[in-house]
């Protein structure tokens, strides 16, 4: 698999669930046009990667509750996260965890995506 050029910031425990192949839908408030390898970043470290295949939605919380095995989020989290907004499922496959996490330097303005060009040796 190619090294990702773009990283997604994900909080725990969801980041680990993604790279361990247990979480195949990452729930977000926005769509993205990106497809392909995507690094998974948590707590300032690139811990693994997955292929972003597609984005589905918009979904209501009720619609997402029919697929708990894919997003692994409980109802309270989904409702708090969504507020009154629709949600999107970023469809992930081929995830794996790196043997050693890579440090990702902090830069102002990073909220969702990170350019990983400075991370790779």
Image (spheres, rainbow, N blue to C red):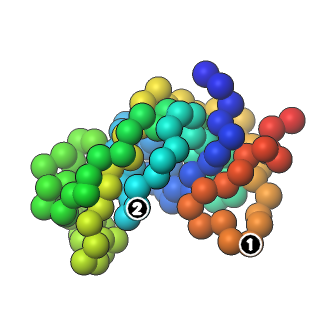
> Residue 44, relative to residue 76: is it above or below?
above
Q: What residue is shown with label 1? A: 108
Residue at the image point whose x is 64% and y is 59% from the top: 43
Q: Quadrant of the N terminus?
A: top right
**Residue located 83% across and 47% down the image:** 118
The residue drawn where x is 21% and y is 48% is 68
Residue 81: image quadrant is bottom left
Which mark is in front, 1 or 2?
2
Q: Position of residue 74 (x, y in %)?
A: 25, 60
Q: Residue at x 26, y 66 (%)?
A: 86
Query: In this rendering, would 65 be left or right of 45?
Result: left
Q: Which quadrant, please, contains the C terminus? A: top right
Please indicate whether residue 44 sits to the left or right of residue 73 in the image: right
- Give whichever of discs 1 and 2 has the lower sequence position: 2
Image location (x, y in percent) of residue 25? 34, 44
Q: Is label 2 in a helix, a strand or a loop? A: loop
Percent position (x, y) of residue 50?
51, 35
Q: CA distance from mark 1 to mark 2?
A: 21 Å
Residue 30 is marked as 2
Q: Nearer the viewer, residue 64 or 44?
A: 64
Q: Nearer the viewer, residue 47 or 66?
A: 66
In this orientation, does residue 111 appear? yes
Q: Give the left or right position of residue 42, taking residue 69 as reference.
A: right
Disc 1 crowd rating (10 Å Cα; few below 14, some 14-19, many 20+) is few
């Amino acid at each position: 698999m190619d090294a990702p050029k773009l990283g997604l910031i994900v909080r725990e425990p969801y980041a680990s669930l993604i790279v361990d192949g247990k979480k195949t839908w990452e729930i977000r408030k926005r769509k993205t046009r990106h497809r392909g390898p995507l690094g998974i970043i948590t707590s300032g470290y690139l811990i693994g990667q997955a292929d972003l295949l597609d984005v589905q939605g918009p979904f209501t919380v009720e619609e997402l509750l029919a697929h708990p095995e894919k997003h692994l989020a409980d109802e309270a989290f989904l409702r708090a996260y969504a507020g009154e907004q629709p949600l999107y499922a970023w469809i992930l496959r081929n995830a794996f965890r790196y043997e050693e996490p890579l440090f990702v330097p902090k830069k102002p303005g990073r909220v969702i995506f990170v350019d990983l060009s400075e991370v790779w040796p």
